[in-house]
Each structure stands twice: as C-alpha cells, then as structure tokens.
Amino acid sequence: MKKLARAFAVVVLTVGVWQLVSGLRLVDPFLLPPPSQVAPMLFTLLGEGGTYAALGATMYRLTLGFLLATGLGIVTGLVMGGIGWVREALEPTLDFLRSIPAAAFIPLALVILGFGHASKIVLVVFSAYPVIAISTMYGVGNSNPVRLLVARSLGMSERETFLRVRLPDAAPFVFSGLRIALSISLVIVIVAEMFTGTRAGLGYRIVDAQYGYRLREMYALIVLTGILGYVLNLGFRRLEKKVVHWAGRQ
Amino acid sequence: MNSLEVRSVCKTYDEGNTEVLRGLTFTVGPSEFVALYGPNGCGKSTVLNIIAGFVPPSAGQVAAPSRGAGRGGVGFIFQDFRSSLFPWLTVAQNIRLGTREPRPADAPSPADVVDLLGLTEHAKKYPYQLSGGLCQLTAIARVLVLHSPLVLMDEPLSALDYHYNATILDLLGKLHADLDNAFLMISHDVDDALLLSDRVLVLSKRPARLVGEVSVDLPSPRSSDLRFCSEFPQLRSRVFELFSEGLK
C-alpha cells in the first residue's frame, strides 16, 4: 500500500510540475498545453471511433510482429543454445543486426514492402527478433551447472535433460528478453507509423496532429501511447510472475 | 561384494601438470557408511565426481553400481542443496524426479519418504519457499526414493545452521541404521564424520593419497549426542593425527 501511495505521489508531482510550468508560462502553453487541457482532450479522443481504429491498427502490427519475432527468436535461440557450431556461426551476425537501430531500416522497408501493414510488422520483427534469440540462447546455454549434474546423477538422457532442465532453467532469461523486446516493438511500431506514409495507427495520428498544429491532441495521443506501453508492460510482468514464478527467488 | 571399489585412481588436470589424486584405493562395503576427511582443496570432491561418473579418472578404476532396470545406480546429494533442487517443481515433484518404472520392489514410495522425512506439509511448496534445512531434506528424499545401493554426499551438513545440522545428522544416522544403502560422505567437520561413519578415511594434502583410516565403533543408530561419549575425544585425536601426517 505504501509502495502504491509513493508511486501515486510521484505521478501527482509530475503532473503538478507540468501544470505549473505551463500555467506560469515558463514554456509557451501553446507548445506545452497544461494537463488541465490535455486530460479533457484525451477523454474526447477516447469517445471517438477513430482513436480505437488507430489503436487497433497499432496493436495489430505490434501483436503480429511480436508473435512472429517470438516464434522465430525462441527457435533460433534454442538451436543456438543447444548446438555449439550454430551458435558460433550465427552469434556475430545477430549481434551485428542487433546493433543497427531498426529505424534505420524504415526507408528499406518502405521501398521493398510499401505503405501497408507489412513494412511495420517486418520492422517490429527485425527489432525484436535478435533480442529474443540472444536471450533464449544465453538461457539455454547457461543452465545451472549443479542442476545439470543432478540430471546426470538421476540418469536423464540428453533429450530429457534438455526438456526437463535446460528449457525451464532458460525460461526466466526468455521472459526477460520478451519483455525488453515488447518495449522495443512498441517504440518501433510507433516510429514506423510516423514515417512510413501510413494513414492508420497511433504514430500516424501523433504526427498528423503535429503537422496540423493540434498540439493538445498530439499530447493526448502521446499520453495514450504511454498508457498503452505501461499496460502492456504491466500485463507482461504479471504473466511473467505467474509462468516463471521462481525467477529471482532462488 | 563391495558397494564401491576405487583402485589406484589418479587424476591430473592441465595436461598432467596439476596432480589432484595419486593412486587412491579404498572400498565401501554394503550398508557401510564411510567418510572422506582431508584438507581443503585436497581433491575430496573430485573423488566423488569420479565415482559418480561426472569426470573420468586419469588412471585407475572405479567399480560403482550402475543404473539399470529396477536399479537406482549412484545417488548424489550435493553441497549446494538450493541449486540442486529444481525451483519450477514442487517438493513432491522434485522427489519424484528421478523415479523410473519399473521401480525396485523394495524401493520406498515417494509418499513414504516424504512422510518419513517430515515433508508432508511442505509437499506442495516450491524450494524457494523452504528453509535451507528443508531443501536439504528434499534433496535427501529425492535420493532415497531411487533406492540407490550407494549414496554419495558432498558435505551435506556444511551449509546448514546448528539446528538443521543436528536434525539431518540424526536423520542420516537413523537412515543408515534402518536402510541397506551404503554411504560415502565428504566432510570437513571431523565430528560429523565420526558421528555418522563406520570408517573415516583421511586424505593427504594435494595430490591426495590415503594417509590412513579410523574405525569408528560407536553404538547404532548414530546421533549427534554421541559426541559427548567417552570414546569420542580419542577418535577425534586419532583423525587429527592422521590429518597432520597428511599435511607433511
């Protein structure tokens, strides 16, 4: 309860500072509208169907891209973690790809895949996939050595050891990779929607409001995007706590 | 027939530059409890790892029970009991982990072992919800259900507080009296070694060789109270003499 109260206090303080900075005209209120103007705008937007269409488009791209990256990343990570020569062959390339900001591929995605969903989904996959693959690989390749010896002493076969020891031991690593990848995916999908000429999605709505100097709407959409990211992260943390309940508690 | 025969076992690392074990020979008889005692870093754990098949010897032979249909092979209780349990499994699931069908006819059932070790109320808990002593009891239970002819224990009491040290020591003493498993235990605590064992084998400093052995003729079942019996100081002194000899 105390924890919740402290967190709430920080939110109130942040909003209060924002209100003061704008209200005292330390920054031009046109450029930084106070929360007392942004909040009603947010509620107005939440009453419009167009907002949900934008949210739906963003979520569709994010979900599909993230699920594809999860499937591909986990399979790649498992193979790399389990087979030494595959790891040696793929790791430098994955590390290199991970080092390139996915936003740098926006022009390429546009040229090859056009303005539709595909370019954004591929950008999400490109940004999330290496993170998931590498965290899975580390998880599988860094099983607790004592538990591996226990498996041997209990007479487990290689296959059993993989399924009953390496995989569950890797799960906390996989989940932390997925959580990081989810945050990156949201950033990328919003950025991609801003700059890939689409006419749907929260990213597009934010830049559209900016181009039209509807700055209150722009701020409200930014807050909405923040809420979306927060809820996704919170939901994922809850799922993580349920599935890998032992993580960090050994 | 002995439960374990170790003959002239040597172990070197770094292409022969680091010698850990030098011609170690000893046996463990059926239902016998033997302790290995020696200086820190002399290679006691290496001996257990070789017997368990985790690392091969550089020379010499080991004849240990192998796992087969209806046979438990070698059971191993690790010093790091928290890591040795699988945190995603409950206590009951951890205990059943190594069981195979068909089970040996005289093997105790997992439920019986859980009951025997007083783990019934903790059976549905996860290892991270247990104290260190209860984790070690779970690890012991996991080995008992295998009904292994030989149980290896790598300092099973060293990481426990006084209460659980005494509790588990008494339990091991009782298990040794009641069951027909042979036990080989590493200990750096001479009292623990004497209280539980029929024989204490004293190893020298690295490269470890057998300096000598002390037969422990104390009443059974063993318990932690026996450290106050009249023979105990003499036995302790005999072990320390051999220990000092091994340091030369």
Image (tube, coloured by chain):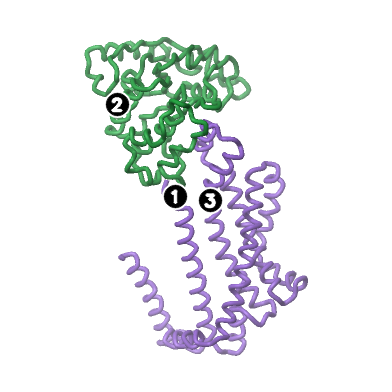
Chain colours: A purple, B green
Neighbor class of circle 1 (other Cα within 10 Å; few <14, some 14-19, many 20+) is many
Discs 2, 3 touching: Cβ within 8 Å: no
CA separation in Å, label 1 and label 2: 31 Å
For the residues labelled 1 and 2, say whether their Cβ atoms are less than 8 Å apart: no
Chain letter of the residue carrying label 1: A
Tell me the amino acid under the disc marked 2: Asp
For marks 2 and 3, give the CA distance. 38 Å
Q: Which residue is labeled 1 in the image?
A: A246
Q: Answer above or below: position of B81 versus B9.
A: below
Q: Which chain hosts label 3?
A: A
Residue B121 shows in the view = yes
Q: Residue furthest right?
A: A112
Q: Residues within 10 Å of mark 3 (few under 14, many from 20)?
A: many
Query: Which secondary structure, mark 2?
Result: helix
Instruction: Name the secondary structure under disc 3.
Output: helix
Of the pair A219 and B114, the residue shown nearer to us: B114
Residue A157: where, in percent of width, then height? 59, 35
Residue B205 is left or right of residue B164, and the answer is right
According to the image, label 3 marks what residue?
Answer: A171
| Quadrant occupied by the N terminus of chain A | bottom left
- Give the mark, 3 or 1, whose residue is nearer the N terminus: 3
Say which amino acid is labelled 3. Answer: Ala
Quarter in which the C terminus of chain A is drawn: top left
Measure how far apart labels 3 and 1 are at the Cα level.
10 Å
Q: Nearer the viewer, mark 2 or mark 3?
A: 2
- Circle 2 is placed at which residue position? B170
A104 vs B239: above or below: below
